[in-house]
């Protein structure tokens, strides 16, 4: 989260009154993340998150907001977008698309153990199944096409060794994507960004997934790879903790067992997930946008993760 568009107390108060959310008591800009402007807002009726969208458009956003509504109706704990008096969940504030959602209970678990990974694996599988009948379509906007477009932009900022690695991995992922095995992978709505800081726990119990604004239609295995690369690694080295990984996968497969093709391609999609975030972090780091409270993530982290997945693939 970050703050690109400044919203005053009075502006936020009027907006929240328009949504019948009561009287604003406090507003606080949210640090962390890099895509949108986010504020934590407390009123006399509850706690909410106000988001102004800096990249996603009025045309794209209904996919994400209605997805949250869809998942919530099917028992998946996610933020619920607030409707106005006409039933609209996409609003406008300071000329930008905007939404307000309820703030989930609890806190992010930034040092997860096997039990936390079990909870995330179970709920991710339930989310994948719950989204199968979601009617809206939106491609994953940070998929292979975007990597192919963005890698040439960040190449001048890399060392020769890094350029060699990123180009080789990009070529490999293009090869995988063209294969019949990849084309047969189960697909549907994926979260696309289910890191430790996008899940809430309260007293050890998972209370919700949030930040769905990288969601899209993609392979479920890509979502699994993203989770394994964050929830189940040592953050300093990028090395996989097989105890946590096994717990995550066992819980996921109790709900949705992997196909034979998924089991075979799991190492490749873990590499794809590492490449995706290495590329996006390089882009954000070397081509930053102006924002207050913006903290660019270290691109080197996912370079290390990718090297680890290459050296030590995780097999089921």
Image: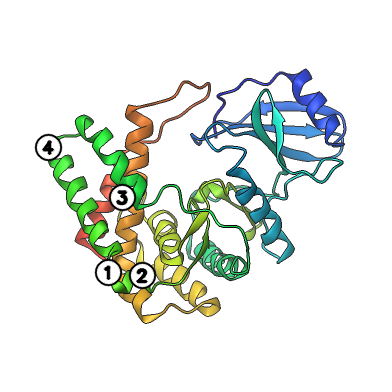
Closer-to-camera residue (197/138)? 138
Give the residue drawn at x 14%, y 45%: 164
**In 3D space, how far apart are the residues under numbered discs 2 and 1 (Cα atoms)?**
6 Å
Front of the two marks 3 and 1: 1
Quarter-of-image position of residue 297: top left
- The first of marks 3 and 1 along the sequence is 1
Q: Are circles 2 and 1 on residues that touch, CB within 8 Å?
A: yes
Closer-to-camera residue (314/89)? 89
Q: Left of 124 or right of it: where is 87?
A: right
Numbered circle sitting on residue 252: none
**In 3D space, how far apart are the residues under numbered discs 1 and 4 (Cα atoms)?**
29 Å
Residue marked by disc 3: 275
Front of the two marks 2 and 3: 2
Closer-to-camera residue (151/199)? 151
Residue marked by disc 4: 160
Q: Is residue 180 visible?
A: yes
Q: Is residue 301 visible?
A: no
Q: Position of residue 73 (x, y in %)?
A: 74, 63
At label 2, counting other C-alpha atoms closer than 10 Å, the crowd grade (few under 14, some 14-19, many 20 or more) is few
Q: Position of residue 14 (x, y in %)?
A: 82, 24
Front of the two marks 1 and 4: 1
């Amino acid at each position: 989260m970050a703050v690109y568009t400044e919203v005053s107390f009075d502006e936020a108060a009027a907006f929240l009154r328009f949504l019948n959310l009561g009287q604003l008591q406090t507003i606080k800009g949210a640090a962390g993340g890099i895509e949108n402007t986010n504020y934590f807002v407390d009123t006399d009726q509850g706690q909410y998150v106000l988001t102004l969208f800096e990249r996603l458009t009025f045309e794209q956003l209904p996919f994400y907001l209605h997805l949250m509504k869809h998942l919530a109706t099917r028992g998946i704990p996610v933020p619920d977008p607030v409707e106005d008096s006409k039933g609209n969940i996409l609003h406008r504030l300071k000329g930008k698309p905007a939404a307000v959602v309820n703030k989930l209970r609890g806190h992010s678990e930034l040092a997860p153990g096997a039990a936390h990974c079990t909870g995330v694996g179970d709920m991710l599988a339930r989310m994948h199944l719950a989204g199968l009948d979601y009617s809206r379509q939106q491609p994953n906007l940070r998929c292979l096409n975007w990597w192919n477009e963005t890698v040439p932009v960040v190449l001048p900022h890399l060392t020769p060794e890094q350029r060699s690695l990123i180009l080789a991995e990009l070529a490999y992922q293009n090869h995988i994507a063209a294969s019949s095995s990849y084309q047969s992978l189960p697909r549907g709505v994926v979260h696309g960004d289910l890191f430790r800081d996008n899940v809430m726990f309260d007293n050890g119990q998972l209370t919700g997934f949030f930040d769905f604004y990288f969601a899209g239609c993609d392979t479920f295995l890509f979502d699994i790879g993203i989770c394994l690369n964050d929830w189940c690694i040592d953050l300093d080295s990028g090395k996989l903790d097989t105890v946590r990984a096994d717990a995550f996968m066992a819980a996921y497969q109790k709900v949705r067992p992997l196909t034979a093709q998924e089991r075979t391609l799991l190492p490749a999609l873990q590499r794809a997930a590492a490449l995706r975030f290495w590329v996006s972090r390089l882009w954000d780091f070397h081509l930053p946008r102006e924002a207050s409270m913006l903290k660019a993530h270290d691109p080197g982290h996912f370079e290390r993760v990718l090297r680890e997945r290459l050296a030590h693939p995780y097999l089921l």
